[in-house]
Image (tube, rainbow, N blue to C red):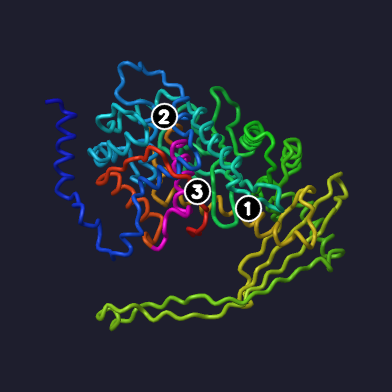
Amino acid sequence: MDRELLDNKRISERDDKFKPQDDQALCKESKEDKEKEKNLVAVLSTTIGHYFPEFNKWLKEISDPREQEAIDFTREAQIWTGIILFLTKRGARKKISDEMRTKEFCENLKTLSAQANLERVAHGDAVNYAYMRFKEEEFELLLVKMMRRLLRVRALEKYRLLGKYYTIAIDATGVYSFNYKHCEQCLMREDKKGNKKWYHLKLQASLVTWDGLCLPMASEWIENEAKFSKQDCEIKAFYRLIEKLRRLYRQLPMCILLDGLYAGEPQFKALEEKRMEWVVVFKEGAMQEVFDWTMKWKAEYGLENVLVKKERKEIGVRNKRTHQERLMRNKPGHQTRIVDRERIYTWMQGIKHWNNQRRYNLLTCKEKEDGRINCDYIWLVSNGLLLCRETVEELSEKGGRCRWKQENEGFNTQKNGGYGLEHCYCRDPAAMKIWNRVLEIAYFISQLITRGSLVAKEIYGSVINIAHRMFEHFRYFVFKKPLTPKKIQIRLCWDTS
């Protein structure tokens, strides 16, 4: 018997021992919760069908140089396998071979990928073999098609800054690192002890919202060319990325959110040429002359430009369980306390520097909680955003402070939330980037599922539980797609933070 068939038989026999019966729940839960819980494979299919009805058609448009008559798995099935790997947060390519090759999984994959003759799930190496032959730019274009579709159906309309601009955060993150020279495009860093490290960085542009959405739009790899005199850097990639953004989203009104690294006249001019507004973190040390001048000017002439917002809210105080409560298995007695929160906004428009033609708009926000300073921000704001008393709070809360969504909900979630952003799924330079693009697509879809109204948060408790339960549904239950899907409405509702 063929070795692969033996492996499939072994996996099937192993899973049959633990497969729940029709009248047996996957875990002990109340009858009411069981009724509320839905098959998450069906939720995935419904979400894709609602937001991206042409998703499989887009997958079919990706070029496939493999010999079509000799392959057992279409490009759609191979791409869907990778997406499911990240959606269910398996964390390694080996999990495809070890855990995803059951009969039920194959049937669900057949339904999603629309490959009628699919008899088994591909081996992880077969998926990687296909990714080595695909083109990375076509996967980025797939992500762009998804974002364009959301914008076209106005699913993100309520998140516009000042009712007009979409807030897009740009920041770089480390993706892969090696103790040896991985490829010719690797960046290299040497510490004081002479230890060398080779790594790959990526500059990411994501549409961020005040309530926690962080949807990837485009990215640019920070890497060296074949012959170079100076290594590539974040600033060089920034110019390439904003040009790509404007080319991919020609008419989209954008407000770019940036950290202090980009506070400079060349970056401001480049953004203006691309018809982009901006909010940039302004720190002491970045444009030092301008910083001293603008802060001095605001202190002298902007004394009246102050807006104070106060609020009092009740928050929970989590107490540790006592020894007696642990013995009795009782929950700790939680309490609440009242917090007085104060936000102080100041601003100054049209500050003209003595040695420059540009007029700077300065915005600050200081937050105090029970008299202690929580944060103190300073931003430079572009002229098109019309900084004034009526807009200062929105520009701060739904503009400048949203830049952190890229770090927290974006990079931190992808690195530490089960996606394995820093895990090298393949060492081939081309396939390595394809896996990263598939991760971005899965992360995009995951946010639409976990924040959508089809999933009840109280049933699963957390986003990671949704991923684990989805994997169980893929392995143990077969989802049948209805011939005539019902027209539904999905609202992006609850905050996963």
Q: Amino acid at mark 1?
A: Lys
Residues packed near mark 1 inside 10 Å, few (<14), some (14 to 19) or many (20 plus): few
User: Mark 2 and mark 3: span between their CA atoms?
Assistant: 21 Å
The location of residue 236, given as percent across then percent down, is 64, 35
Q: Which residue is mark 2?
A: 431
Using the rendered image of the protein, determine whether residue 475 is visible from the camera's viewpoint: yes
The location of residue 136, given as percent across then percent down, is 48, 28
Residues packed near mark 2 inside 10 Å, few (<14), some (14 to 19) or many (20 plus): many
Q: Give the SS element for disc 1.
A: helix
Query: Mark 1 near mark 2, Cβ–Cβ under 8 Å?
Result: no
Q: Amino acid at mark 3?
A: Phe
Using the rendered image of the protein, determine whether residue 195 is visible from the camera's viewpoint: no
Q: Nearer the viewer, residue 316 or 378?
A: 316
1 vs 2, front mark: 1
Q: Nearer the viewer, residue 475 or 88?
A: 475
Q: Which residue is mark 1?
A: 158
Q: Horizontal placement of 356 versus 399: left or right?
A: right
Q: Which residues are magenta?
A: 436-458
Residues packed near mark 3 inside 10 Å, few (<14), some (14 to 19) or many (20 plus): many
Q: Give the SS element for disc 2.
A: helix
Above or below — where is 103 with respect to 454? above
Does 3 lie within the magenta span? no
User: Mark 3 and mark 1: span between their CA atoms?
Assistant: 24 Å
Q: Which residue is mark 3?
A: 411
Residue at the extreme bottom: 324
